[in-house]
Amino acid sequence: QDITEEMLGMSVPVIVWVAPRGAQAASAGTFITYAANLAFMAHAAEIGPAAPVNLSGEDQSGTGELEAGERATAAIEELAVERERNRSRAVDAVDGKAALGAAAAAEIEVVDGVASSLQELFEEMDGRTVTTANGGTLTLETWDDAAGALTNRVRFQHMSPWQQLLHSVATPEAAFLLLLVGLFGLIFEIYNPGIGLAGIIGAVCLVLSFYGLSVLPTEWIAALAIVVAVGFFVVDVQTAGLGAWTVAGVAVLAAGAALLFPRSSSLSIDSWVIVAAVAGTLIFFVSVMTAALRVRLRRPVTGEESLIGMVGEAETDIAPEGTVRTKGMLWRARTMETGIAAGARVEVKATEGLVLLVEPLHDKEPAPHASPSIKGGK
């Protein structure tokens, strides 16, 4: 409605061209086409139907739906009268009748002509008279027959990269997937402390997701459910298993995605996207996060602490101090036991600086890290 009102108030001619071949001006596009001073369609293009599409998420069943239809009918009738277009066909379009092709639309004066290229468009516009909002009448001079060229320079107005990005994220699937990826990035960063790439990517994705969700008619309870579902997966990662929390996470994630946008709106997330997102979430937490947690909790592999749990052999009596050999090296050792005889197997329980705290092992297997002893004989 804002677009059509602005078009009707323009002091310069506004021309709508439904192109290229196969294009369709449906719903709001039909209203915009009717609001133009001149309208043209490419061959194989279509116009209509113009039945109102509910994007707000408000319940328009029953009386609400009827009122919306009546308002749409009144609006398109007004446009048809203002621009001298086919009024009855405009009403049919709002009632959901089948779309019209370019030739048929031009024949019954829904549009002003057929043009499949820019040259044809400017040839069709040339010499036509239009009335602007200030009451002025203009005769268009858009094509020079003698020169076989346009009389004006054509400039295309494209969206900036930033506008294209914001336009792309304001779709149900993009906003939903960005929310998941953003949460994954932040969780991965928490398990790998530091300001890393995962955290930056996660934060950017969440910002873009919240923008998209703020533009769309979002059910914020469902969005919160998605966050809670991801939390359920984190709980199972912490407990190192796939249990009830994972099952709950799958159910809540699928439900949250399905209910993220009101059923009364014309927006929804495709079911295959939901299935893929749930599967991807499982893979992320079962493989990536499990591996990340394992690395985080892994015992140090260098320094004195790496000796904890190692098995060695007492080189001397340890009562309570002596020396042991483990990992091919001699270490000072101390025990809390009554004493450990030379040659006994020991296990490193802790370290105090460069001193190993050991306890005896009572099995009879040879120590894997002790050097073999060589005894001389006569």
Image (spheres, grey):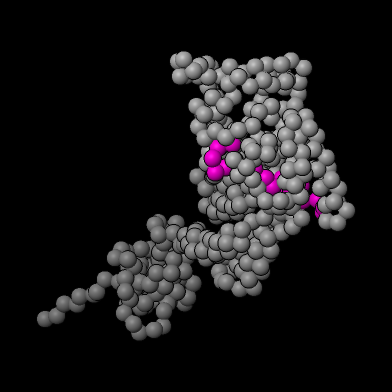
The structure residue drawn at horizontal position 63% and vertical position 37%, both measured from the top left corner, is 106
Q: As rendered, which of 193 and 30 lies closer to the eye?
A: 30
On the image, the x and y values in percent for residue 192 come to 52, 52
Which residue is depicted at the point 68% across and 60% down? 258
Work out which residue is located at the far front of the displayed protein and give it: 107
In the image, residue 141 above or below residue 181: above
Q: Is residue 18 left or right of residue 74?
A: left
The image quarter containing residue 121 is: top right
Looking at the rendering, in which quadrant would you find the C terminus?
bottom left
Nearer-the-camera pick, 129 or 61: 129
Q: Position of residue 71 (x, y in %)?
A: 83, 42
Side of 61 relative to 333 (left or right): right
Residue 42 belongs to the span the image colors magenta: yes
Give above or below for 71 relative to 146. below
Residue 285: x and y, percent? 54, 62
Whether residue 336 is visible here, answered yes or no, is yes
Residue shown at the point (50%, 27%) measured from the top left: 119
Identify which residue, 181 or 242, lies in the foreground.
181
Residue 7 percent coordinates (x, y): 72, 27
**Which residue is most to the right?**
63
Question: Camera-side residue: 217 or 367?
Answer: 217
Q: Which residues are magenta?
A: 41-60
Residue 215 among magenta residues: no
Q: Quadrant of the N terminus?
A: top right
Decide: is 295 above or below 214.
Answer: below
| Quarter location, residue 157 | top right
From the image, give the main secondary structure of the stretch colored magenta: loop
